[in-house]
Image (cartoon, helix red, strand yellow):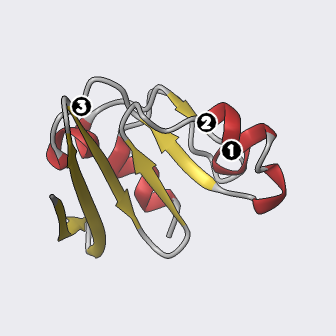
Amino acid sequence: MVTMVPVAVGDHIMLGVEVKLPKTTLLTISNDRGYIMCGALDIGLLNERLADRGIIAGRAVGVRTLEQLLEAPLESVTVEAEKLGIVPGMTGSEALLKMI
């Protein structure tokens, strides 16, 4: 099942998506510029094979809900995210606000 919900981050509304799969759930919260995602996100792939796309993204591991994704520290981020001041250890909410 796929669920899409509005997610408030500061004064902004973003899109939360939850995809329930066998034995796992994929989570992402996005805005017009970038996104954060659960541990399924492959930052290495985005930085290396898809570098020409300039993807702004961050990855948090061990999260099971959209709320946890907002609160968790990011484990890794793309090179393009770093250019905006987004760094590992920053919460998902902090990173999303820098993507605006």
> Element at badge 3?
loop
Q: Amino acid at mark 3?
A: Val
Q: Are marks 1 and 2 in contact (CB under 8 Å)?
A: yes
Give the quarter of the image for residue 69.
top left
Label 3: how many Cα within 10 Å (few below 14, some 14–19, many 20+): some
Q: Position of residue 100 (x, y in %)?
A: 50, 70
Residue at the limit of the structure toward the right, as seen here: 52
Query: Residue 43 bears which disc, if any?
Result: 2
Query: Residue 46 bears which disc, if any?
Result: 1
Q: Separation of disc 2 and disc 3 at Cα? A: 16 Å
Q: Position of residue 21 (x, y in %)?
A: 22, 42
Q: Amino acid at mark 1?
A: Leu
Identify which residue is drawn at 57% across, 35% down: 42
Residue at the limit of the structure toward the front, as seen here: 22
- Left or right position of 56 against 79: left
User: Which residue is the site of mark 3?
Assistant: 63
- Left or right position of 72 against 50: left
Q: Position of residue 28 (x, y in %)?
A: 34, 53
> Element at badge 2?
helix
Q: Amino acid at mark 2?
A: Ile
Q: Position of residue 83 (x, y in %)?
A: 72, 49
Residue 13 higher or lower than 42, as above or below: below
Give the quarter of the image for residue 8.
bottom left
Which image quarter is the N terminus in?
A: bottom left
Identify which residue is drawn at 76% across, 61% down: 53
> Element at badge 1?
helix
Residue 76 higher or lower than 58, as above or below: above
